[in-house]
Amino acid sequence: MSECRFDGQVAIVTGAGNGLGRAYARLLAARGARVLVNDLGGDMHGAGASRGPAARTAQEIVAAGGIAEANFDSVATGPGGKSIVKQAMDTWGQVDIVINNAGAVVARGPIDENTDDDFCTDLMVAAGGTFFVTKAVWRHMWDRNYGRIVNVSSSAFLGMNSSAGYPAAKGATWGLTRNLAYRATSQDKDIKVNCVMPTAAARMTKLMGDAISHGMERYYPPESAAAPVGYLAHRDVAVSGEMFATGGDIMRRVFVAVTPGYDAGEGRLTPELVRENFGTVFGEANSTLVLNAYDKVALDRRVDWQAGLGS
Ligand code: NAD
């Protein structure tokens, strides 16, 4: 089996001063990538800033014989995203890989306790950060016809006892992933965009109590979620627009399915008909997957072609 390597490539890993981002950056660098290690260096709720975490990860990589530079910008603003990409371009002249990993849980408690500002900050870090950095690098990848982007979602958006902004932002990163994957695939560009939903011991999991925290550190160290990102960032990745659950040295696909549903046929669908047939609408039997970027492009082209025939 040949090794998945990144020789000659340049990667940006955001939020790489701690936890999962650090593990992603170290894996890519150990396999030959030159890595821009971005981290604002705030606390786990996004407050404050420090150069320490990004500098430390970059130093670790260099000490291990790799190539890295630290970057201390926030991903959560347009100028921050541009500055991160500019540093990589000024230093190495190209960007092949972006891992949009930076994240913080700013708001705490249920929705009625979340301030408007905290909600917006949560959106700006996870969803905004993914948007700002990707926007700054997109044209470069498009013109070179090459790019691998890995976005980071969270199972929090599938329903968890968390604040409102964080899961909303993490749902947005999945939507953005599908949008970018479709756009690139439909133009036959070799730009692949996928998304992970990791589980790993990190600063946050220390808040869950000693028993959970120790179990997580033993079975879900950040390194146990790094290999899937290594594959998704590699030239050989087979898919685009997909979501994977990662951590504990396991990688699973997460997908959206639709049920066959209830069709009112020639008649109008009414609330009463929905009530009467809700079991058929809701039941999972014979569900089909919502299409990925490749299937959807193929289908849309067929529809275009059929529409052309009709005109
Ligand atoms: P972490 O707190 O250890 O690391 C996140 C890093 O992002 C920190 O070093 C932080 O300084 C940096 N960061 C925060 N805001 C930033 C900003 N505006 N600009 C640049 N850097 C910023 O957390 P982690 O657990 O390693 O999480 C990494 C990613 O994985 C996050 O997006 C998180 O939401 C996601 N995630 C983690 C888990 C888990 O189980 N650990 C679960 C689901 C999702």
Image: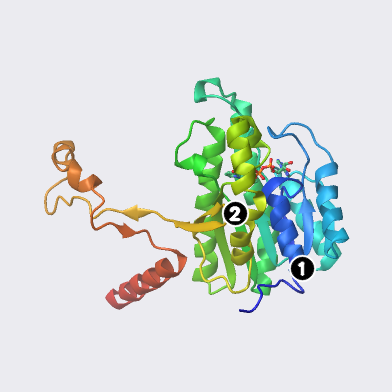
Extreme-top residue of the structure: 113
Compute the Cα span from label 2 to label 1.
Answer: 19 Å
The residue depicted at 62 percent of the width and 36 percent of the height is 213
Q: Nearer the viewer, mark 2 or mark 1?
A: 2
Q: Is residue 149 left or right of residue 282?
A: right
The residue depicted at 15 percent of the width and 46 percent of the height is 268
Amino acid found under the numbered disc labelled 2: Asn
| Residue 101 seen in the current view | no
From the viewer's side, name the closer residue of 260 and 297: 260
Q: Which residue is mark 1?
A: 94
Q: Is mark 1 within 8 Å of ligand 1?
A: no
Q: Which badge, 2 or 1, comes first in the chain's sequence?
A: 1
Q: How many marks?
A: 2
Residue 232 point in image, percent of width and height: 59, 64
Rendered-image quarter of ligand 1 = top right
Q: What element does badge 2 sit on? A: strand
Q: Is residue 101 left or right of residue 264?
A: right
Disc number at residue 201?
none
Q: Is mark 2 within 8 Å of ligand 1?
A: no
**Neighbourhood count class around disc 2 (C-alpha, 10 Å): few under 14, some 14–19, many 20 upward:** many
Residue 250 point in image, percent of width and height: 53, 57
From the viewer's side, name the closer residue of 106 and 130: 106
From the viewer's side, name the closer residue of 311 and 206: 206
Amino acid found under the numbered disc labelled 1: Gln
The residue depicted at 77 percent of the width and 68 percent of the height is 94
Q: Which residue is mark 2?
A: 151
Residue 152 point in image, percent of width and height: 59, 50
- Quarter of the image containing the C terminus? bottom left
Q: Relative to 206, say whether 301 is above or below.
A: below
Q: What element does badge 1 sit on? A: loop
Residue 273 point in image, percent of width and height: 14, 41
